[in-house]
Amino acid sequence: MKGRDSMKRTSHISELREIIAMERGRGRKIAFIPTMGYLHRGHLALVEQAKQTGAFVVLSIFVNPLQFGPHEDYASYPRDLDRDASLVKDAGVDALFHPSVEEMYPQQMVTYVEVGQLDTVLCGAKRPGHFRGVTTVVSKLFHIVQPDFAFFGQKDYQQYLIIQRMVNDLNLPIEVCPVSIVREEDGLAISSRNVFLTSEQRQEAKVLSQSLIDAETCLRSGERSTRTLEKQIRETISGNCHGIIDYVEVRDAEDLSEVTMIERPVLIALAVKFGSTRLIDNKVVEVYSHDQNDDEI
Ligand code: AMP
């Protein structure tokens, strides 16, 4: 019987491939969860869902330099491998992969994977090159792990859509599984970066999720103008915290195209900077053109 003590742990691609080949040989499917570590309840929700597939669960921890801009927080991104290893072992992960930068990028990269259109808006517009770094490293990890299932949190909704599109466009035989956002009690979306917030910023940051809830309420009670909703969210945030708004946008939830009047499911997404800490949050609201008032449905 496999116990918790049996978690495999490696920083080498070749060793991980051997571990996975062995499990495949035993007829097991592979579920994969890519992360940048400093794990929290959000990541553990992905583990929980991955385990429900019955597959052999592989979790990677890699702070990927390729997806950070030159003035972003790559160097200061929080890291604690020992703590993470003990958390994932307790959560029932079967194999932990924590490669070094040299292992993942032994030479200067000249090959990239880029998903057009979807990566030019929202966080993609504010963080040039970010999603190219994400899709490139996730492609590499997909080739290393060759999973049947891959789990992505909706906290990074745009990332999830981009990965799903990459998998479709490149015919990768992987089922991309989205996982709902895990929040703190006061609504703040859990993030590894929350650790950088001062207590005052932490207190104020709850306004982000509150502004999304208010916008949803407004939408459900009949408001259909994205401009009005975006304005309302901006005012709620500006009026209740010292954070600097990076963007607040309502877009089509499937393809992130611009929306003027809401008639289909939309993504309400925002990014706000508290000092040097940039937080993101979002909500998908399903409304359809025939809805007059969702309360009547
Ligand atoms: P990260 O380590 O921040 O790159 O996140 C790794 C994965 O965990 C990504 O798919 C994230 O979307 C997901 N994730 C991070 N925070 C949360 C959260 N609060 N709720 C759900 N998923 C999350």
Image: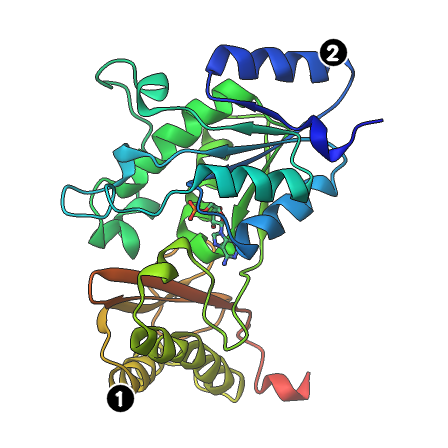
- Give the x, y percent position of residue 239: 26, 88
Q: Amino acid at mark 2?
A: Gly
User: Would you say 39 lies left or right of 201 here?
Assistant: right
Give the camera-side residue of 199 and 66: 199
| Residue beneath the point at 23% across and 48% down | 73
Q: Nearer the viewer, residue 136 or 60?
A: 60
User: Which residue lies most toward the left here?
Assistant: 71
| Disc 1: which residue | 239
Q: Left or right: 133 with respect to 188?
A: left
Q: Secondary structure at mark 1?
A: helix
Q: Is residue 269 above or below residue 226?
A: above
Q: Secondary structure at mark 2?
A: helix
Judge whether 193 appears above or below 289 on screen: above
Image position of 275 (left or right of 138): left
- Is residue 243 shown above or below 39? below
For mark 2, what is the residue? 25
Colour scheme in use? rainbow
**What residue type is disc 1 on?**
Gly
| Image quadrant where residue 107 sits | top left
Q: CA distance from mark 1 to mark 2?
A: 58 Å
Callout 2: few (<14), some (14-19), or many (20+) C-alpha neighbours within 10 Å?
A: few
Locate residue 24, reporting x and y percent. 71, 16
**On the rendered image, what quadrant is the N terminus found in?**
top right
51, above or below 216, in the image: above
* Residue at position x 59%, y 49% in the image: 44
- Crowd around label 1: few <14 · some 14–19 · many ≥20 (10 Å): few
> Is residue 27 toward the left or the right of residue 244 in the image?
right
Tell me how many marks there are: 2
User: In which quadrant will I find the C terminus?
Assistant: bottom right
Q: Residue at x 64, y 38 (%)?
A: 89
Name the spot of residue 274 as percent of width and height, x first.
25, 68
Task: Identify the residue at image location x=49%, y=87%.
Answer: 222
